[in-house]
Image (cartoon, rainbow, N blue to C red):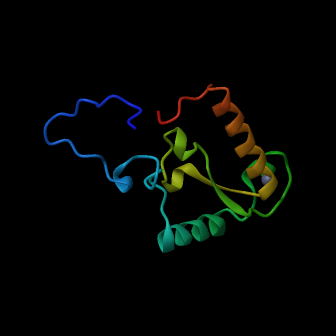
Amino acid sequence: MPTQPPRYRPPGWKPAKPWERPGLFVKDQRKRGRAGMRERAQVLAEEPLCRLCLGKGLEVASDVVDHILPLAWGGSDDRSNKQGLCDPCHDAKSKAERKLARQRKIEVFD
Ligand SMILES: [Zn+2]
């Protein structure tokens, strides 16, 4: 039993393959695999101390590589957009970013 009326499709129209649809498999331009591992190790070697803690006068080892401007907000995956953070700082920054996104203060994808 059909539940929707038939839709008009131009001649030659085909449904998009799942891997061609944005958001399912292609989320961002993040480096993955060995290239991503190499770059994360390089950033952590260059910035052994958490950047935000250094700003507060603390010396805490950095645990993760953070995108200063998140990829989902149009940030690049270049070295200039990356910083080393400790886990608590990264969690707090991510939480604040999610909160802003929920309040739709930030336009996702520029
Ligand atoms: Zn920190």
Foreground: 63 or 55? 63
Foreground: 95 or 20? 20
Where, quadrant-wise, is the N terminus in this rendering?
Answer: top left
Residue 63 lies left or right of residue 6; in this view the side is right
Name the outermost residue toward the right: 58
Residue 100 lies left or right of residue 55; in this view the side is left
Foreground: 42 or 9? 9
Foreground: 14 or 49? 14
Residue 12 lies left or right of residue 56; in this view the side is left
Q: Is residue 55 above or below residue 48?
A: above
Residue at position x 48%, y 48% from top?
A: 76
The spot of residue 70 in percent (x, y) is 58, 44
Name the outermost residue toward the left: 11
The spot of residue 104 in percent (x, y) is 62, 26
Q: Is residue 100 above or below residue 71?
A: above
Residue at position x 20%, y 41% from top?
A: 13
Residue at position x 17%, y 34% from top?
A: 10
